Image (cartoon, helix red, strand yellow):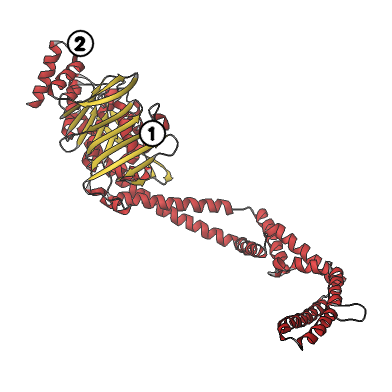
Amino acid sequence: MLLELTIKNFAIIEDMRVEFDHGLNVLTGETGSGKSIIIDALSIVLGERASKDIIKKGSEFAYIEAIFTKEDDIDPILEEQGIEAEDIIVISKHIRLNRPAMAKINDKTVSNALLSKITDKLIDIFAQNESSSLMNTANQRKLIDSFGSEEHRELLWQLKENFEQLSDLKAEYAQKNKNPEDKAREIDLLNYQVKEIEEAQLTSDDDENLENTYKLLSHSFDITKNVEGAISLLKSSYETVSAEDLLDSALSFLSGVKNYDEDISEDFQQLEDIRYRIKDTVRNLERYLNSVDYSEEKLYQVENRINLVNSLKSKYGHTTDEIYNYLDQTKKRLDFLTNYDREMTDLKDRITKLEKKATAMAKDISSQRKDIATEFQRKIKGELRDLNIKDADFKVAFSDKKLSAEGVDELEFMLITNKGEDFKPLAKIASGGEMSRVMLAFKSILAQEENIQTMVFDEIDSGISGITAQIVGEKIKALSKNAQIIVISHLPQIVSIANSHYVIEKIEEEGRISSKIYKLNSQERVRELARLIGGLNLTETALKAAEEMLFKKEE
C-alpha cells in the first residue's frame, strides 16, 4: 500500500507531505485547490513523463517521493535490477530545469520503463482521461488479454515474434522479386564487375608500394645523379679531394702524435672507425645505385597499373580489402540471381510455413480470448447490476481481421444501459455517470484478478448523485476491504463512509499561492461534510445531516 507521498515545488504545491491509511481514504477540497494535481504528481513519480512546466514558478526543481510497502510479486524484478528492498520501496522523481528528470527506487537510478513495470504491480490509478483511453478498441483487446493465463501471454509473445519474422521475410521477398529483363541486366552487370576485379589480380602491394615505385621510376635520373655525387664526395678519386682522402690525411698526422702520447689513442681510434663506416656507406650507396632499374617501358607499366587500381577503387572500395569484400558480395548476389527461381521458391516456402504457423497461433489466441471474454462479460454484467444499472447488458463483440502481431481478432466492448435499446459501442455511451460506473466495474474486476493493493480514483463519481452515488460508494467501500483505496470525491455519500478524510486547501502566504493538505479529525469531518451537503453557509440542518451520515457509517 501507499504509505506516504511527498511533493515539493510541483505546480501550486510548494511542500506537501501526506500519510495514507488502510482502507478507504478520501480527498476533498474546493475546485482549483489542487486535488487533481496530487494525482498528476503521483502519476509522474510512478513512471509518467514529466514536463518542466510543472516546476513551481521561481523554483529550480520539483521533487516527488512515494513510499510503498513491498509486495512479494515484485521481488524477482527488484533482484534482477540489483535493487535492495526489505519492507518498503521508496520511489522518487527529481525534475530539474537544467537537466533530464531522474527517477530512483531505493536510491538506485532507474528508467521510466522499469519504473512503470514495477509500479504497475503496486498501484492502479483511474484518472479522468482513462475512460477515453478505454474507448480505443486496441486497448480493449489488451484488457481482455491481461486477464489471460501465463500460457496465453506466452502465446501472444510467440505470435508477435513469429509475425515480425514473417514481415521481414515478406519484405525480403518483395525486395528480391524482379522481372526477367531487370534480372538479366543485373546479371550482365555483376558478371562484368566480377571479371574486372578478378582480372586485376590485386595484391596488398597495390595499396602499399605501387605509388612509391612510381615515384622512384619517375625520378630515377635525379636519384642517380645525387647518389653518384654523394659517392664522389665520400670516395677516394683522382679528380677531387674526397672525405676518405681527408680522413686518411688526418689519420696520418695523428699516427705520428700517437707514437709519442698514448692519450690521443682514443681520438685516433674514433676517427679510424668513422673512416671504415664511410667505406661501408659508400659500398651501400653503390649497391643502391646498381639496383635502380629504370626503363621507359617499366614506367609505362606502373602508370597503367596505378590507373587501373585507382579506377577499381573509385568503383568498388578505397582499399584492396574493400574491393575484395565487394567482390564477395557481388558473387553471392550473382549466385542468387543465377539460381533465382530456386531461391525465390525456397523463400516463398519459408513465408508460407511461417504464415501457417502464425495463423494457427492466432486462432488459438482467438479461441482463448473468446473464453476469457465470456467470463469477463459475466463478471461485468454482475458488477453493473450491483452499480444500479439494472437493465445493463454487456458483451465483447468479435470480428475477423487480417493476421497481425496481435492476432486475427477485432473486438469491441458493447453495452446496453436501458431496456429496449440495442447494443452500442462503449465509445457511444453519452452519460458521464454511466461511464463512471462502467469504469468502476472494470476496476473492481481488475483488483480481484491482479491483486492490486492500492487503487486511486480521480472523480470516479462524476455525473452521479442520490441512490446511485450511495451504491457507488458502497462498491468502493467493498473494494477497500481487500485493498487500499484513495478517492478524490465531492459526494457526501462517498465521503461519509471513508476510513480517513483529507482536505486540500489553496492558501495565500506572503503573496504566494500554494496548496496544503490536512487529515481531518471527527469534528472537522462533520464541518467538511456539511460544506459538501449545503455549501459554504454551514446551517444547522447541514451539520445535523453530516453528523447523521457519519454516525450511520460508524454504526
Q: Amino acid at mark 2?
A: Asn
User: What mark, if any, has residue 61 been given in the picture?
Assistant: 1
At 83% from the left and 80% from the top, the residue drawn is 244
Q: Mark 1 or mark 2, which has the lower sequence index?
A: 1
- Toward the bottom, the furthest residue is 259
In which quadrant is the C terminus drawn? Answer: top left
- Toward the right, the furthest residue is 239
Structural crowding at the residue carrying mark 2, measured as other residues with C-alpha within 10 Å and reported as few (<14), some (14–19) or many (≥20): few
Rendering quarter of residue 337: bottom right
**Could one spot residue 158 in this view of the protein?**
yes
Judging depth in this view, the residue of 346 and 36 nearest the camera is: 36
Residue 163, given in percent of the width and then of the height, sits at 43, 50
Q: Amino acid at mark 1?
A: Phe
**Could one spot residue 390 in this view of the protein?**
no
At 20% from the left and 10% from the top, the residue drawn is 537
Q: Which residue lies under the disc numbered 2? A: 537
At 26% from the left and 48% from the top, the residue drawn is 74
Above/below status of 29 relative to 226:
above
Above/below status of 152 relative to 522:
below
